[in-house]
Image (spheres, grey):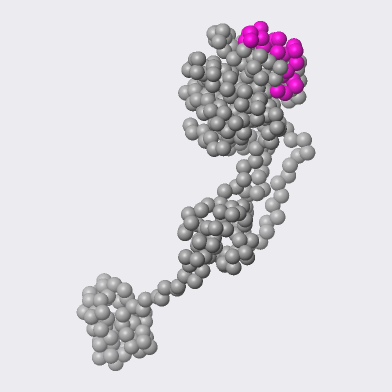
Amino acid sequence: MERYTLQQRIEIIKIHYKNGENLAETVRKTRKFLGRREAPCRTAIQKLVEKFELLGQLSDVKNKIRARRSRTAENIAAVAKSVEENPGLSIPRRSLELGIPQTSLHRILHKDLGLNAYKVQLTQELKPADHQQRRVFADWVLEMHENDPEFHRKIILSDEAHFHLGGFVNKQNCRIWGSENPRVIVEKPLYPQRVTVWCGLWSGGVIGPYFFENEAGATVTVNGLRYREMINDFLWPELDGIDLDNVYFQQDGATCHTSNETIDLLREKFSDRVISRRGDHNWPPRSCDLTPCDFFLWGHVKEKVYANSPASIQDLKDGIREAIEDIGQPLCDLVMENFMKRIWSCKRGRGGHLPDVIFHY
């Protein structure tokens, strides 16, 4: 009845009582009074009459606003102090400590203090000596960049990664809503099928993918001999036509990368410009946050590949090729610019983990 004015409601009540409290007659007379479209229905008239007889009024009753008992200035201040002292405390424990209901505490945190809950991010542990090595590497890159502003476009950064056929299921992020537990089980083979892929990334694009496999097409473990076969049979032909006089090649410190034979083979093309453990310029260990393959390439490719749910190893390999082919040179150039931002951040952090570097593309 909110759309009717108080005067119109009074007229409806008068009509109702004048016609012997006959609802059907009241409806007909009201239609003449307000028009067929605007007139209230039988139920609406009955409710209006009941309100008048019960409360003695025709105006709408406004709901009373409950007083905020828990979200007081004192409680808000107490919660703010508690968060400052211990930001990692859970809502149930903080509720017990402060004597504030969990629902009210949640509203204080979100609405009054404007806070959000963030998950802890796990990263590889840095050993005591790693900070110094990361600082030395960052200083060297920045010095080279100062002498040559195009230096970051002259580094090929490489890495291998495993792609499992079934991807993975993160049960912490998977929820199935229902009235009963569906008891869904995802079977995971003990030795899942996978492919091992090598790629190189630089401002000119992505070199690869190269799959480590035997003549039968089965995935094999990467060792020094197979890694050198990849360099001779795949990498060198891929680099034909590229002026390598000022190009540096980076690889991590895996044992298969750092034998004397492998380092000597890389120096045939890159002379004294090999960035690696036991190379010409040391690559700091446990520095996944600095190499584009780890902080960009593999995550980008896996997101594209597993979105199509590959059903076979061949589907998986085809998906990897397609995802890498879609990465254009402009995007790789942005990745290398982000690499320099990470180097700056590493220097500012005295070789520690990068505090908050976000890659946009």
Q: Which residues are magenta?
A: 253-272
Image quadrant in which the N terminus is located: bottom left
Q: What main secondary structure does the magenta stretch of the protein show?
A: helix
**In the image, is residue 206 above or below residue 123?**
above
Residue drawn where x is 57% and y is 48% of the image = 118
Determine if the magenta segment contains residue 271.
Answer: yes
Which residue is at 51% across, 69% downward?
A: 70
Can you say whether 84 is above or below 231 in the image? below
* Quadrant housing residue 162: top right
Q: Left or right: 33 with respect to 71?
A: left
User: Is residue 355 among what the camera can see?
Assistant: yes
Please report the residue visible at 62 percent of the width from the left and 12 percent of the height from the top.
Answer: 273
Residue sitting at the far right: 190
Q: In this view of the protein, can residue 238 be seen by the observer?
A: no
In percent of width and height, residue 114 lies at 48, 54
Give the image location of residue 64, x and y in percent.
41, 76
| Residue at 36%, 87% in the rendered image | 55
